[in-house]
Image: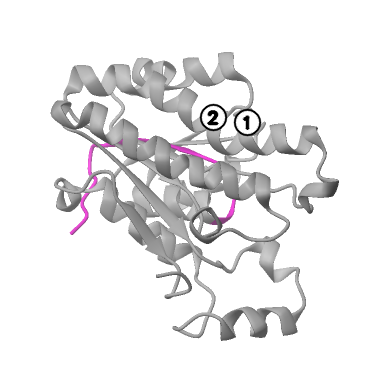
Amino acid sequence: MFELTGRVALVTGASRGIGRAIAERFAGQGAIVVAAARGDNARATVDAIAAKGGKAEAVGVDVTDNAALEQLPGNVVDTHGRLDILVSNAGIARDQLLMRMKREDWDAVLATNLTAAFTLAQAAMRPMLRQRAGRIITVSSVVGQMGNAGQANYAASKAGLIGFSKALAREVASRGITVNVIAPGLVDTDMTRAIAEKAHADWAAQIPLGRLGTVDDVAAAACYLASDEAAYITGHVLAVNGGMYM
């Protein structure tokens, strides 16, 4: 189930958290994974995959460097002969109430979370159109669906991914390419673990399933959307949020 043997997958933000979990899950299902992150930050992900017998390579890229990002899918094809799956996961937050938000923090979040997904998808479409097959997955957030005070820039970027993905899904469906979105809720990551234990309990109380999500919850959803089992799903937002937003 959810077999990805022989598929070539490019995953951004693959150095930790959700991106690393997706990269490791894909490799575990037989995919060749290109793990992209700043500098050499994805090396640990690739080493973990190799230790389990998987196939992966680390690529250093700044997703706000448009020129480098435009070349990345083509480089993957040059090395591996094809590109089957693109996961745009790289993201940042620069939280502040709108009255105090700096323009550079707005621009940085939109550039990293939204514009990078556009740049990558545009470049990845070329080999996918030739193949007449492909999977494009963007990682949004529950915040893009319901909003959150102090995160106007983050919410705008994540809501933008949903609209972008739905529009692109309509453009490329006839060529066998699906485009879908994962919208995680509150997920247990390095960032959330640094917050007080009481805050964790308060958050869990807002979630019908009674717990924060795990990176593996999100990775499992990505693996499904990348697989043949999801061939008839496109333009969909898959909420992985424990019922936090329905």
Residue appearing at x 52%, y 61% in the figure: 146
Quadrant (top left/top right/bottom left/bottom right) for the C terminus? bottom left
Mark 1 closeness class: few <14, some 14–19, many ≥20 residues within 10 Å: many
Contact, CB < 8 Å: mark 1 with mark 2?
Answer: yes
Q: Nearer the viewer, residue 229 or 81?
A: 229
In this picture, is 239 found above or below 201? above
Callout 1, which amino acid? Ala
Residue tagged by mark 2? 116
Quick check: can you spot residue 124? yes
x 54%, y 35%: residue = 114
Residue that appears at 34% across and 19% down: 77
Q: Which residues are magenta?
A: 1-17
- Residue found at the very far right of the displayed protein: 100
Q: Nearer the viewer, residue 100 or 36?
A: 100
x, y (%) of residue 135?
28, 37
Instruction: Give the numbered dot on residue 111.
Output: 1
**Residue 220 drawn above or below residue 232:** below
Dot 1 or dot 2, earlier in sequence? 1
Tell me which residue sits at (77%, 77%) in the image.
196
Majority secondary structure of the magenta segment? loop
Q: Amino acid at mark 2?
A: Ala
Task: Find residue 80 and report its horizontal and vertical position in percent.
Answer: 33, 23
SS at mark 2?
helix
**Horizontal relation, residue 101 to residue 75: left or right:** right
Q: On the rendered image, what quadrant is the N terminus found in?
A: bottom left
Which of the colour schemes (rainbow, by chain, secondary structure, one colour) is used?
one colour
> Left of 57 or right of it: where is 157?
right
Disc 2: CA contacts within 10 A as few (<14), some (14-19) or many (>=20): many
Percent from the top left, x then y, of residue 32? 34, 38
